[in-house]
Image (cartoon, rainbow, N blue to C red):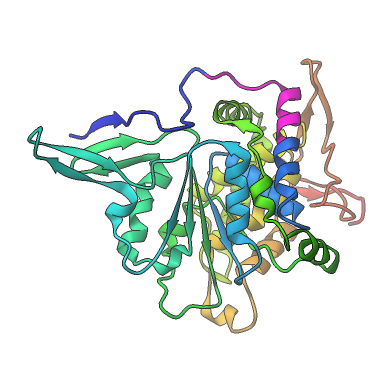
Amino acid sequence: MHLQETLPAAKGFAQDGIPAMDTEGFALLSEEIMAVMNTVIDGKKDSVRLALTVLLAGGHLLLEDVPGVGKTLLAKVLARAVDCSVNRIQFTPDLLPSDITGVSIFNQSSQSFEFRAGAIFANIVIGDEINRASAKTQSALLEAMAEHQVSVDGTTYGLGEPFMVVATQNPIEMEGTYPLPEAQRDRFMARISLGYPDAAAEMAMLESHQSVNPLDAVEAVATVEQVTAMIRTVSAVHVSPAVRAYTVALGQATRSSPDLRLGASPRALLQLLRAAKAAAALAGRGFVLPDDIRSLATPVLAHRLLVERSAASQGVTATTVVQELLATVAVPGFEVPVPGGAGTGAAGAGLSGAGLSGAGAIRVGMDGRGARNARGH
């Protein structure tokens, strides 16, 4: 039987009893965090917002792109913007699981074993080039990412709150790497591919990054207690039964798609809903819209899906499959909560966001069969 223990609080570890943050404070602090991050990451406001969304949703982030586009820099500035404990792990083939989780060392003076905590014991853990470590070492992250705890020599040690793993990997240079298994990828809430900046952002970068490193000027704008309060605000965001039904419908559609040999797991749907709650809170809403689900479906689901070889040979990717399903799976009709408890707003209100712009509203009953309305169909 494992003994649940918590190590002495590291710098920034939050304690229980922190209340949720009020709406105004949440909006001001989230904008301040993103503003600080955008001073370092040029021309990538959507990626910055998604990184903060994952943090506030209590998830983990996978940054996957070619070298030199700012993957590690994004992880660093996110950690620097919050005054919490941060550890960086450079994944290499000779890295051992105990380097991550910690190890018990015999103390001759006390004639007993003492646990020395590994790099995983921090609020934000940056795993650089995660696919360069062996599968055995990668697996040391599984328990920590899923359960926020580490088991060593029969003893279980709890991790602090908040806890987030931000891992980077290069999908191009595959020699000497160990691809992440599906179980590992499924523990990352979202995957971001930064891509190259546009010309204007690249000109600004060449001007601002020459004489000084912008990261050196970044100061924390939020305490770990404030981030914990923001996370608890996100957890209280309302999700209607219709939005849950739409999330389930998307998940089931991935499992029945002829182009996929592995669809979205139940964990994937849970994390999609949690990310949508964070997106709603960042938008100043206390409830989730279908557009929140649609806008996050690709970064949350695509990296978990496996495409059939025959479909892949024809150019089908996990991203294109998700986009196709978003175009075919009907959005449920639902009623938007009205602040103050004065009933509900018009069904389908707010569906004109990026996910449905120009396509006309789509409504279905709770039986899932549904019918498109007359606008544009």
**Residue 375 appears in the rendering:** yes
Q: Is residue 51 above or below residue 84?
A: below
Q: Is residue 326 above or below residue 162?
A: below
Q: Residue at x 84, y 47 (%)?
A: 353
Q: Is 9 inside the magenta-drawn segment?
A: no
Viewport quadrant of the C terminus = bottom right
Q: Residue at x 54, y 70 (%)?
A: 170
**Residue 290 appears in the rendering:** no
Picture quadrant where residue 273 is located: top right
Side (left or right) of 204 relative to 210? right
Q: Residue at x 10, y 32 (%)?
A: 110
**Residue 245: x %, y % from top left:** 63, 42
Q: Nearer the viewer, residue 59 or 366?
A: 59
Look at the magenta stretch and give its main secondary structure: helix
**Residue 346: x %, y % from top left:** 86, 31
Q: Nearer the viewer, residue 334 or 99?
A: 99
Q: Nearer the viewer, residue 245 or 104?
A: 104
**Residue 107: x %, y % from top left:** 13, 39
Q: Is residue 367 above or below residue 252?
A: above
Side (left or right) of 174 relative to 72? left
Q: Nearer the viewer, residue 154 or 324?
A: 154
Pick out the residue farthest to the right.
Answer: 375
Q: Is 29 inside the magenta-drawn segment?
A: yes
First to last magenta residue range: 18-30
Side (left or right) of 297 relative to 5? right
